[in-house]
Image: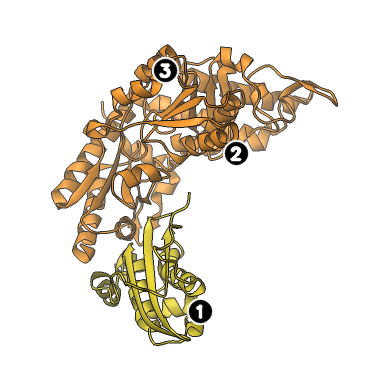
Chain colours: A yellow, B orange
Amino acid sequence: MDMMDAERIYRENILDHYKRPRRYGRMEGADAESEGANPVCGDEIRVWLKLKGERIEDARFEAAACAICTASASMLLEQVVGKKTRQALGMGRQEVLALLGINPGPARLKCALLPLEVLKAALKKPASKGGGKDAGKG
Amino acid sequence: MALDVEAIREDFPILRRKVNGKRIAYLDNAATSQKPLAVLEAMERYYRTCNANVHRGTHRLSEEATDAYEKARANIAGFINAQPEEIIFTKNATEALNLVASVVCRQAKEGQRILLTQMEHHSNIVPWQIWAAERGLELGYAEIGEGFSLSGQSVLEGLSGSPLIFSFTHISNVLGTINDAAWLCRKARQAGAYSCVDAAQSVPHMQVDVREMGCDFLAFSGHKMLGPMGIGVLYMRRRLQECLPPFLGGGDMISSVGFERSYWNAPPRKYEAGTPNVAGAIGLSAAIDYLRRVGMGKIARHEKELARLCVERLEAIGKARIYGPKKRAGLVSFNIGSVHAHDAAAFADGEGVQIRAGHHCAMPLVRMLGEAATCRASFYLYNTEEEVERLSHAMRKAQRALG
């Protein structure tokens, strides 16, 4: 019973990806990019992609977000580089939770899924030079 | 004499619950409060014994329901030193503020100004934005100055433009800043502006007297003061009830209706269309009886002491950023080092400690602080020092794991 919820969620691999996020940092000359925010808790994330034909050649992100969101972005982008865009678009909640290895519970699900949402948005719209400003809503 | 917190806690069945195997420590009172048995029983008694629609029937039950509803109104009026007819029941403080915005702005002329402050909750920003867009009005914001307090100079500058209304919060739900409402109302009156006070965070925690304050409007919610959800109050000065238009149209707010036009009922019923939340009003009245028995002064002192201890414990962790003035209400907004507020709240939850993490429905203010989100612990009469210690313990754990 001493197994706390927080300790169940903040496992080694999640903390590792949070403290040393992979594929972190701005990308110049991206082919696609998107940003998103979770207005409830204030997570903000931006994703850049380099595309070659049907393939995701490179992916980067920057985030001001909680551990669950940051770790999810890090694991997700690591996973999709080299994959076909169609495969990435086919991913859903189950795939993300499998990557994380935990079910973060209903209150944190949005944190875990935000990176996938933003990745998909980037894949669906072409890059606009200078970047769009559509994060944050009331 | 200090509060007998252990005796008080006995009256709140929910506080016996456990979360993650730990006794619950409910520190999210600025969002909503828990309800004592006296409130739950008063509402149940109403539904069991005299439920009927009010102001309509000529039968016994309707008379009893009307009587209970109007007694609740009188009790609530007395609590803030208003006349019963100056109390308008709404759904919550948000609806009360929307009511004010609607009745004031519908008569406004294009180009008139509305003055707010930088420390408002969304409910005292968005209704004004909606009406400003509708009627071509301008919005201004009095600024936050030194020490997380409103800048008096900025208020006076804002009022120098003779705005239609100055609407401000009594206590900031993010910073815990206690504004000098009487001074702000006086300055508004001198500038020829209506004054409207968002008292959602003050009426539950301190003695508020609308005559002393001199406000034209004052809004608060029942659920933040031991009452049920779905009942709120708007105090509206008697004189204004006569000259301002109604809010919602429907039954009970009219004296007679024709196909072409209708005549309004006498206030406050002019502002209460449709079947009201009678059980909610009765529950809120019972909550006020409970608060009175304990004593508002004692409650305020107890909460401030917990907030002081909380600040002291968080500062001892190091790397804590604490937002709010030294002389604060019973709430503390903070972040610990690089730990995201949402993660900090998850660690608190692991210890059974319920705190809020986010922008607290005050996005512009939280952004001004340079944070995407903050943690907030907010106290009430049933909280204990031991609960503050548990919060501090959980924050140390979060700092160790994620900092």
Give the structural element (helix, strand or loop) at label 3. Answer: helix
Camera-nearest residue between A51 and B191: A51
Of residues B387 and A43, which is closer to you in this image? A43
| Residue underneath mark 2 | B44
At label 1, counting other C-alpha atoms closer than 10 Å, the crowd grade (few under 14, some 14-19, many 20 or more) is some
Does label 1 lie on the same chain as label 2? no
**Residue at mark 3 shares a chain with residue at mark 2:** yes
The amino acid at mark 2 is Glu
- Work out whether residue B286 can be spotted: yes
The residues bearing labels 2 and 1 have C-alpha atoms spaced at a distance of 52 Å
Quadrant in the rendering for residue A131: bottom left
Residue A116's quadrant in the figure?
Answer: bottom left
Q: Is residue B117 left or right of residue B234?
A: left
Labels 1 & 3 near each other (Cβ < 8 A): no
Find disc 3 in the rendering and name its residue.
B188
Task: Name the residue tied to disc 1.
Answer: A89
**Residue drawn at 17 percent across, 42 percent down:** B312
Q: Which residue is at the front of the view, B271 or B150?
A: B150
Q: Is residue B323 above or below residue A113?
A: above
Residue at the location (67% across, 31% down)? B248
Q: Residue furthest front?
A: A129
First in residue order: circle 3 vs circle 2: 2
